Image: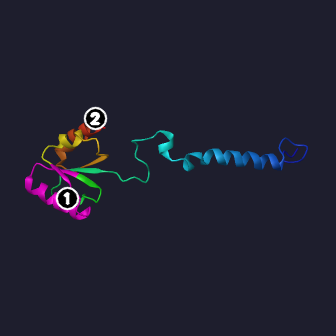
Amino acid sequence: MDIFSPKGRFSRRSFIKTTAQVGAVLSFPTIIPSSALARQGRIGPNDKIRIANIGVGGMGRGHISEDTIAVCDVDKNHLSQAVDRAKEKNGGKEVDAYGDYRRILERKDVDAVVIATPDHWHGIIMVHACQAG
């Protein structure tokens, strides 16, 4: 028995109607902005992620991008060079500099951290960053 025949369970018309309804329901989240769905504070797929770099000597300085808003290093020379590089990358916007990574982790405007410290410091900084959210 053919289910699309007039004597079957589905007609061509009901199939098209059901398909259109399912398509409308599935496309709903892409049509309505996230702000209308009470998702304030969440980072959207088109928002820029604000990055803080921890450890900015040598290789760490190479990870600085236009989205860097803060840098941290215990070496003041590395720190000043990193601030200059970050300003160069982001068009001259201010970049905050810290000597203690815990100050960066206290900030609520940092979305991600890049940890480029010596190997023996990676673990503890990563754990603290995860705890900070």
Report x, y in % for residue 50: 31, 51
Range of residues picked out in magenta: 70-97
Residue 42 location (% of width, % of height): 40, 43
Q: Which amino acid does label 1 sit on?
A: Arg
Q: Residues within 10 Å of mark 1 (few under 14, many from 20)?
A: many
Left or right of 42: which side holds 11? right
Q: Which amino acid does label 2 sit on?
A: Gln
Q: Is mark 2 on a helix, strand or loop?
A: helix
Q: Quadrant of the C terminus?
A: top left
Indicate the secondary structure of the residue bearing disc 1. Answer: helix
| Residue at the disc numbered 2 | 131
Residue 78 is one of the magenta-drawn residues: yes
Picture residue at 74% right of the left edge, 45% below the top: 18
Q: Position of residue 61 (x, y in %)?
A: 19, 58
To which residue does mark 1 refer?
A: 61
Q: Is residue 82 magenta?
A: yes
Tell me which numbered mark, 2 or 1, is placed earlier along the sequence: 1
Q: In this view, does 67 lie above or below 101?
A: below
Residue in the foreground of this view, choosing between 63 and 1: 63
Name of the residue lying farthest toward the front:
36
Which residue does the image show at 86% across and 46% down from the upper left?
2
State the residue at coordinates (28%, 35%).
Answer: 131
Residue ranking furthest to the top = 131
Residue 57 in the image: above or below residue 127: below
* Pick the front one: 115 or 106: 106
- How far, Cα to Cα, is label 2 from label 1? 25 Å
